[in-house]
Amino acid sequence: MARRPALRRRPAPGPTPTELRAEIEAALAETTRDAALELLEAAGIPAGPVLDVRDALRHPQAIARGMVIAEEDGFLTIGSPLRFGAGAAPPRRAPALGEHNDRIEAWLAESTRTSPATRAPG
């Protein structure tokens, strides 16, 4: 590289991230999502739509990967995209407020009792 002077020159600084964002937002302000994706794809820029939950629940890829989960009450939600071993972990409902308080309090009491930092010297 040292023998090639063109490689030793520093390129001119480009726009700052803030300037670049403003420029992109201005260029796409009057463009639909689909038109913007077409422009980006034509320019060789990898891009995809940002979906809301309703669109994500209907997306063929989410359905094909088994990511649309029906909870116990029939409520549809998106499951985890992470897969370990043979498949996704089965969905579980969120605990009710206070449901595990007794277990947490017992764990805290035990960890406090056995922690070297909380034992009396001697």
Image (cartoon, rainbow, N blue to C red):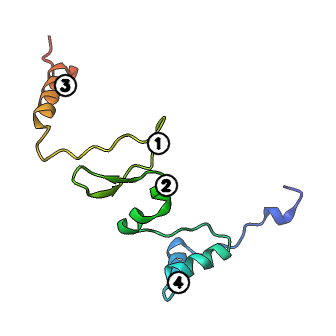
What residue sits right under mark 2 in the picture? 64
Q: Quadrant of residue 107?
A: top left
Return the mark for residue 94.
none
What residue sits right under mark 1 in the picture? 83
Q: How far apart are marks 2 and 3 (CA)?
A: 44 Å
Q: Residue at 23% of width from left, 49% of height from top?
A: 72
Relative to 32, does residue 88 appear above or below in the rendering? above
**Amino acid type at mark 2:** Ala
What residue sits right under mark 3 in the picture? 111
**Amino acid type at mark 1:** Arg
Q: Residue at 61% of width from left, 78% of height from top?
A: 38
First of labels 2, 4 by sequence position:
4
First of labels 2, 3 by sequence position:
2
Residue 108 is left or right of residue 15, and the answer is left
What element does badge 4 sit on?
helix
Badge 1: residue crowd in 10 Å (few <14, some 14–19, many ≥20): few
The label nearer to you, 2 versus 4, is 2
Q: How far apart are marks 2 and 4 (CA)?
A: 32 Å
First of labels 4, 3 by sequence position:
4
First of labels 3, 1 by sequence position:
1
